[in-house]
């Protein structure tokens, strides 16, 4: 199985942020994403760079949202993971 690329991680993090923007509103979703060290997020919620371990960044991003909304986030995130079988679930 291929390892996910940096671009794959940027895409999945962006998708997670955009799903959360629908639930939480774009400002909160982007603010929370910007709390994750090493992840750069544009104002529209697009991840433009990840410095460090991409898998760790993804886990930290999900934790930011789970701390706000709990299980709702996990359900939304699981639908994203279904599209990226090469990535491990958190």
Image (cartoon, helix red, strand yellow):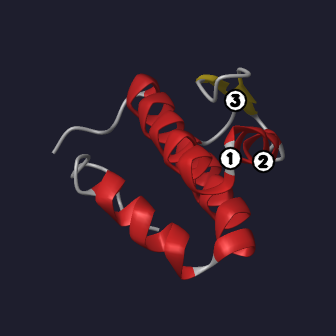
Judging by the rendered image, the residue that carries numbered circle 3 is 51
Pointer 1 with pointer 2, Cβ within 8 A: yes
* Residue 67: % across, % down: 74, 73
Cα distance between the residues tagged 1 and 3: 26 Å
Quadrant in which the N terminus is drawn: top left
| Residue that lies at the very extreme toward the left in this rendered image | 1
Quarter-of-image position of residue 54: top right
**Disc nearest the viewer among 1 and 3:** 1
Q: Is residue 86 above or below residue 4?
A: below
Residue 42 visible within the image: yes
* Residue position marked by numbered label 2 in the rendering: 28
Q: CA distance from mark 2 to mark 3?
A: 22 Å
- For disc 2, the neighbor class at 10 Å (few under 14, some 14 to 19, many from 20) is some
Does residue 53 appear to the left or right of 80 in the view shown? right
Q: So how many labels did they put on this image?
A: 3
Indicate the secondary structure of the residue bearing disc 1. Answer: loop
The residue at 66%/73% (across/down) is 69
Which sits earlier in the primary sequence, circle 1 or circle 3?
A: 1
- Label 2 sits on a secondary structure element that is helix
Quarter where residue 42 is shown: top right
Q: Tell me which residue sits at (53%, 68%) in the image.
A: 73
Distance from the alpha carbon under mark 1 to that under mark 2: 6 Å
Give the structural element (helix, strand or loop) at label 3: loop
Q: Mark 3: few, some, or many residues within 10 Å (few <14, many ≥20)?
A: few
In the rendered image, residue 85, in percent from the top left (x then y), is placed at: 21, 52
Which residue is label 1 attached to? Answer: 25
Of labels 2 and 3, earlier in sequence is 2
């Amino acid at each position: 199985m291929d390892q996910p690329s940096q671009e794959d991680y940027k895409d999945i993090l962006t998708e997670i942020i955009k799903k959360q923007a629908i639930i939480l509103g774009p400002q909160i979703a982007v603010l929370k994403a910007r709390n994750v060290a090493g992840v750069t997020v544009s104002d529209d919620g697009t991840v433009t760079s990840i410095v460090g371990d991409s898998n760790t960044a993804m886990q930290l991003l999900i934790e930011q949202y789970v701390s706000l909304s709990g299980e709702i986030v996990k359900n939304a995130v699981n639908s994203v993971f279904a599209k990226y079988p090469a990535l491990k679930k958190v």
